Amino acid sequence: MLEFEPIKLSDKFWIDPIVKAENSRSADYSFANIYIWNKRFNQQVAKCNERFIVMPMYAEKPFFVYPVGSGDLAPVINEMRLYAEAHGFPFTMRGVTVRHMGELNNLFPKKFDFFENRDYYDYIYTAEKLATLSGKKLHGKRNHINRFLESNDWSFEPLTPKQIPECMAMLENWTEMNRDKLDQGLLDEHDAIIRAFENYRYLGLEGGILRSGGRIIAFTVGEKISGDTYDIHFEKAYSDIQGAYPMVNREFVRLIRALHPEIIYINREDDMGHENLRRAKLSYYPEFLIEKYTAIWRS
């Protein structure tokens, strides 16, 4: 029987090599992402063969994330199914990609039902397009940046632990300014950002800050998650400063390309079902979306 324990920082030591072996462009499997969102999902983890299993809670109901890694998948799935049966909850997996669906159907034909989770599709862009904003479709983004350049005495710099107190102060100010717009998802994101800053160096995170007149007006945080993909975990800017969002996005991707020339794609994660966020992510014309599904074992 699988043995689950609450996720802790030291788990990064054994989880990272397993995630590296999976080499997925999905944002769901990075240790940092799992750890910083733990207050929201109360996650537990287990190792089975050369795969690792995450068991979060959602609306007080446990489920699994697809078991990434290497080695034989079938015995791992069977262990997960037996664990769910023994603990009295439906055997359900989330974060299942199209490739994962194929693997499950091959090993367990007609045993799973699959349901689309559009709100959790990852938006994938080419680093080159985000760094250059070239082409007619992104003309509006370039205009916003030009207006920002005309109106601001600005600078951009890598985010180091030294600047984290300033970023946290900016986050609190941003949160207070947007208090009437905050739903539970944004409140959970606020907690995840704090957790990321508190463990910034240990988690191997990178970031950038945009200043105007010496004051931080935007910050962004991310990490490399696969051989060719970089994941942007967070991006915050003052929306009343025209062009701040596209500017910090462009400058950080330029920094990423300088630090990691092997990066081809930028994952800007999902839209959580927020209409405005979906519209904003689509306005950058993603190269493709990583489809996500829920797999439920047929009883």
Image: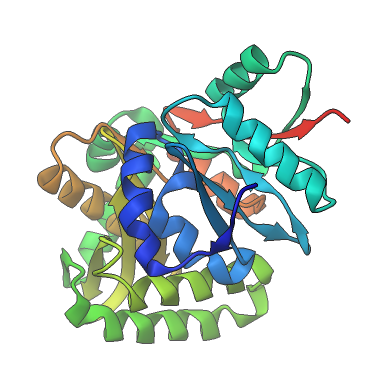
Residue nearest the observer in this picture, 200 or 133? 200
Residue drawn at 73 percent across, 13 percent down? 109
Q: Is residue 61 above or below residue 92?
A: below
Report the residue that reaches farthest toward the right: 299
* Residue 103 % position (x, y): 57, 19
Residue drawn at 49 percent across, 24 percent down? 72
Tell whether 46 sits left or right of 233.
Answer: right
Tell whether 76 sits left or right of 293.
Answer: left
* Residue 142 % position (x, y): 30, 45
Which of the 4 quarters of the picture holds residue 105? top right
Tell whether 66 sits left or right of 240.
Answer: right
Residue nearest the observer in this picture, 52 or 255? 52
Residue nearest the observer in this picture, 41 or 223? 41
Colouring scheme, one of rainbow, by chain, secondary structure, one colour = rainbow
* Residue 79 % position (x, y): 65, 38
Q: Quadrant of the C terminus?
A: top right
Q: Is residue 237 above or below residue 47?
A: below
Q: How many marks?
A: 0
Q: Is residue 164 above or below residue 249?
A: below
Residue drawn at 30 percent across, 52 percent down? 223
* Residue 292 % position (x, y): 61, 34
Residue 220 seen in render: yes
Residue drawn at 41 percent across, 49 percent down? 30
Which of the 4 quarters of the picture holds residue 58? bottom right
Residue nearest the observer in this picture, 289 or 88? 88
Tell whether 57 sits left or right of 29.
Answer: right
Residue 23 seen in render: no
Report the residue that reaches farthest toward the front: 1
